[in-house]
Image (spheres, rainbow, N blue to C red):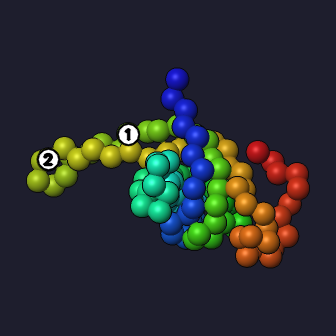
Amino acid sequence: MNKIILMGYLSRMPELRRTEGENPISITRFDIAVNRRGKDRENSEADFFHCTAFGRLAEFVEKYFDKGSKMLLSGRIENNNYTNQKGEKVYGYQVVVDEVEFAESKKDSGNQEEIPENLPF
């Protein structure tokens, strides 16, 4: 089973793009910073995860989340391994997002735009 659940803050604005062709797909990429739990909360560290959402979920993330927004997401981890121009193997990963939820109230986030109640995903 490949499942990851993260709660953290967007560390940059989501970037939406659309594929070209007969059936274009929306793709949004964003990074989420997740605080590590530790005994000393003042000096706690954060882990940063590269995330990708597709379709209507991608459009939703781009529209309703900004840098600093707190979110809860679930998805799976996929490898992004490739060989660079020098012939060296480069290892990486991304979180492919399946679900997203708000992890703070609208007034706490500062986002005053009306958020739909019945979401299609």
Three-letter amino acid code at the position of disc 2: Glu
Q: Is residue 13 left or right of residue 56?
A: left
Report the disc number at residue 19.
none
Q: Circle 1 — which element?
A: strand
Q: Is residue 23 left or right of residue 115?
A: left
Disc 2 crowd, CA 10 A, few/some/many (<14, 14-19, 20+) = few
Three-letter amino acid code at the position of disc 1: Asn
Q: Sequence-wise, which precedes: disc 2 or disc 1?
A: 1
Furthest residue to the top? 1
Furthest residue to the front? 39
* Picture residue at 65% right of the left edge, 50% below the top: 72
Name the foreground residue: 24 vs 97: 97
The quarter of the picture where residue 91 lies is top left
Q: Circle 2 — which element?
A: loop
* Picture residue at 45% right of the left edge, 55% below the top: 40
Disc 1 crowd, CA 10 A, few/some/many (<14, 14-19, 20+) = few
Is residue 12 visible to the viewer in this orientation of the structure? yes
Q: Which residue is mark 1?
A: 79
Q: Is residue 56 left or right of residue 26?
A: right
Q: Vertical placement of 98 versus 25: above or below?
A: above
Furthest residue to the right? 117
Q: Which residue is mark 2?
A: 88
Is residue 22 visible to the viewer in this orientation of the structure? no
* Picture residue at 15% right of the left edge, 55% below the top: 85
Q: Position of residue 44 (x, y in %)?
A: 44, 57
The quarter of the picture where residue 117 lies is bottom right
